[in-house]
Each structure stands twice: as structure tokens, then as C-alpha cells.
Image (cartoon, rainbow, N blue to C red):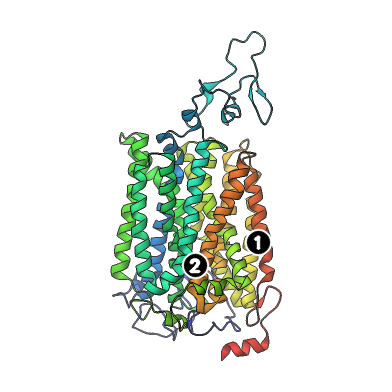
Amino acid sequence: HGFVGSRAPHIAHPQSSCSPLSSLFEGPAAMSVSEYAANVNEANKAVDLNLLPSKLGRDPKHGAHMRAFWGSTISFFLAFVGWFALAPVAIDVAQSISICENQVYPPALYPKRTAFLKYKSVETKVAYCRFGKVGGDTPTDCKEPTGNSTLSKYNREVLPSCVCTPGTGCSDTVLYSSIGSVAVTIVVRVALGTLLERYGPVNVQCGLMTFGAVWVALAAIIFSDWSFILIRTMIGCAGASFVTNQFWCSLMFAPTIVGTANATAAGWGNLGGGVTQIFIVWCLFKPFQAAGMSVDLAWRISMLVPAVLFLIIAVIMKLFCWDTPTAKRFDVSVTGKTSKASMWDYLECLKDPRIVIMIFQYSACFGTELAMNAQLATHFRVYFEMESGSASALAGCFGLMNLFARSLGGILSDCLFAKFAFPGRLWAQFISLFLESVFLLAFACIDNTQPWWVALLVIIVFSLFVQMAEGTSYGIVPFMNPKQLACTSALVGAGGNLGAVIALWCFYKPLGAIDTLLPFKVHAGYVLFWSLLSVCYYWPDKGGMFTGARASSQESSKV
């Protein structure tokens, strides 16, 4: 039976072989049932992840499995596009609403602002203080001219059009909007566990996309710092679509393939976070500018496009998708629960320390991805002083790894499960998280004196392990508490957003003004800490990292 059935999945005797590449197209022997386009087991769950168009079926029931896969994947992808649409143009937004440091405090009137005194061009190495700073790392003024120089000690011409460095009000506004957009999703993701059980994945996902469309469209009228923070925060509600993504696929796929299915659906959905960095700038913002629009109008019109896409996918899902293989609308009985959805279900999950550890491990991988999606474009644009198109391209490379990396994590989890039973999934989790921390630390050691391609190479490898860790996490989640799958998925998903809030509020906000790279180093330590707690996972019927399942528990799991 699938892991959302009335019993926990039998995992004592996994498959003896593993073919990661072929798992995307074919699975183990299955019942040949013409009622479905996909190959299914006795519980009507798909046993393979076949991406061929023919598997979409002739009607909603016949193609239920792959319609759910593509519906959840595409809607989550678009949610990410809208969620982070403002990130690559954040500096342009700041300039439009006049919150840049040099707009609020004109250098001619306020020449001693700390952001000005610290400024030095990355490209030309020319500093604002022509003759040096007074006060070293905490400057109070520029040194007076030396010799017979008639030049002003303040080189105002070297300042960029928008000074938005850490420690400025502009930087704080962008950061607060980023924190708000990931913080609100924590609440929505937790609530989604109950909503999914009451209304089903199709209705919930359509509702999220419609709500998100309204706020993404409203981004076009941002006019102040508070409206920037409010609107970006409300757009973040769409990020909760991840919970629906994982829950919906879990209802459709068998335990032998669910790790790969969940990781692929989520990974290709997360890909939107990388695509939007490039799509918004290169496909919308810059072409609109080339057509004669001002910078201010170009980014505003760009926001309307993802809003329209949100509405289109909502209509398609409502008309052509089912919640489960056997029913158009979901009923909690398919998970083995005999009671209706309740908020007390969350307390039952949180009493399990293993679920709590998974919540924070997911905060260390998905939370890191959200923080990077929010920070990288601005980091490259401000710290490395790159042009908006180049900065968005480099930031986009981080998210583009979702094209295969998260699936790779799910495949690795399924593969090690096939060879070493459940402990294999735990080792896949530990390895991915540990290597993520190593390469995050490596990225934290790259300063703006080094060429951009060094940062790009490290970003790619770092992103690989971030996405793999997300995939290995949801290779474990379906087995933790099968009867409370919706609530467990919601809590772990919310943990990802919690991780982004922790990182942005506790690391990047207070430490960025001290040293731009220090928050990345502290963040790496956070990831390392949670990776080491993988040794705490243990289930009598599944085992732990260093022990297998007890024989008595294995026998009882078959009953």
C-alpha cells in the first residue's frame, strides 16, 4: 500500500537494485490497469514517473497521476516566479520610491553618511574619500586633502545611482520585505495541513494561486517603503503552494517512487526561483526598456505578467485535475485517519522530536534556498557592483540547479533505500546537508577582489547540495507519520520558511553591516549543526543511521 494508506509502508525489504536515471520513466512491475494511463499498484498509486505526454490521459481520472504531478509542479513553479519577481529589480524599485541612501540624504547636504564614507568602487577601486577615511572601519569623515591638491575630499561622482548597502534604510527595507515574504508563508504553510484535509489539494492550490495573483498585480503600484514591505509580504502566501505540491504527489505515487516524484515535482517547482531572476529582467524588464519605457514603468508592467499566469494555471487545475486517483475530491479516510482535520494534529506531530529535527533540517536547506533567492541578486549588484542583468543571471544560476539537483536528491534517497533500507535515506540526508554547509562556507570566503566566475562556480556546487538536501528530506517525510502526512508535510514545509526568517533576521540583518560576508559564514555553521543531528533519527521498524530495523518490528510492520 502507499504510505498514505491505513498502515505504515513496509520498508523492511526494499528493491535490491536501483536505476536512478531510468526511474523517471519506468518503475517496477505493476498492475496493468487500462483505467489509468500510469502503471499502478493495488492501491491505485503510480509506481513510475513517466513524463510522456500520453500519460496525461484521455480524461481527469485516466490521467489523474501525471495531471496531479504536472499541475502541482507548474503551479508551484509559477508561485516561485511571482514570489521572487521583485528580488532582481529590488534596487530599481528602491530608486523608484526614493528610498536609496543618496536620495534620502543627498551627498551634497549630508557628505558624512557612513554608507558614503565606506564606499569604494569595485570596478575602478576609486573611493568616495579621495584621501582616506578618518576612523578606519568605523569612519566619521574623510581625510583632508594633502599637499597642494584643490580637489574636494569627497568624491561624490563615484557613488552609484542608488546607494543601498547594508546598514542603510534602503537595505533594511529590502531586507524587511524579504523577511516578510518568507515569514508569512510559515503561517500559511502550517494552516494548509488542515485546509488540505478539508478542501483537497486542487481547491487549495487554486485558491492560493488566485490570491497570489491579486498581490503580484498590486506590486505594480508600490509607492513607498511600507507598501513595498506589505505587498511583498502578501505575495509570500503563494509560497505555501509547496505543501500542496508534496501532499498531492504523495497521494498519487507509491513508496518505491515517491522520493523521486516528490523531489522532482518540488525541484522543478523551485526552479521558478532561479528562472524569475532571469525571466523578469531579460524577458520583461529590459525588453520593455528597449521599447521606450522608463525604468520605473518597465518593472511595474513586468509584475503583471506572472499575475496573469497565476490565474491561467488556477483555471486549468480546477477544470482538469483530480485530488486522488479514485476520487475527484479528497477524503481524509484515504490516509487512515478516522477523525476530521484538527489543529490538535499539529501538536501530535510536534511531540515527536524526530519531526522537530526534520523541521529544522529543512530550514537549513530550503530556508537557505529562500534566503539566497532573496539575497543573491542584491548581493551581486551591491557588493560586486554588477549591472542588473549580470547580477540576475548569476543569482538565477543558483535556482536553475533545481532543474535536476532536487530530483537527484530524491533519486539518491530512493537508491540508497533500495540498497540499505531506511538507513540509506538518512545517510543521503546527512551527506547532502553536510556538503551544503561546506560549500556555503566556501562562498562566504569569496570577496569582491576575486573574479565573478569564481563565485559562480562555487554557487553552482553549493546550490547542487542545497537542492539535493531538499530532495532527501522529502524522501524521509512520507515515512515519519503516515497517518498525519498532511500536517507533517505542512510543518516541515513551514520549517523551510522559518529557516529563511532565522537566516535573514538573525544573520544577514545584524551582521551584514559589520562585514558583508560574515552572515554567510554564520549561516554555514547553522547548516552544519543541523546536519550532525541526523544521528538522532531512529524508528524501531525502520532503524537509524548506524542500526537497522529490529526483527520484531519488521515482522509487525508486515501484519
Check disc 1 and give the amino acid type. Answer: Trp
* Quadrant for the C terminus in the image: bottom right
Would you place residue 481 above or below residue 110 in this image? below
Which circle marks residue 137 in the picture? none
Q: Element at badge 2? A: helix
Label 1, on which residue?
Answer: 530
Mark 2 vs mark 1, CA separation in Å: 19 Å
Q: Residues within 10 Å of mark 1 (few under 14, many from 20)?
A: many
Residue drawn 60% across and 26% down?
117
Image location of residue 108, percent across then percent down: 51, 20
Would you place residue 401 above or below residue 419 in this image? above
Foreground residue among 525 and 513: 513
Report whether 464 appears left or right of 67. Answer: right
Is disc 2 in contact with disc 1, using a CB cutoff of under 8 Å? no
Image location of residue 476, percent across then percent down: 57, 72
Could one spot residue 538 in this view of the protein? yes
Residue drawn 31% across and 58% down?
311
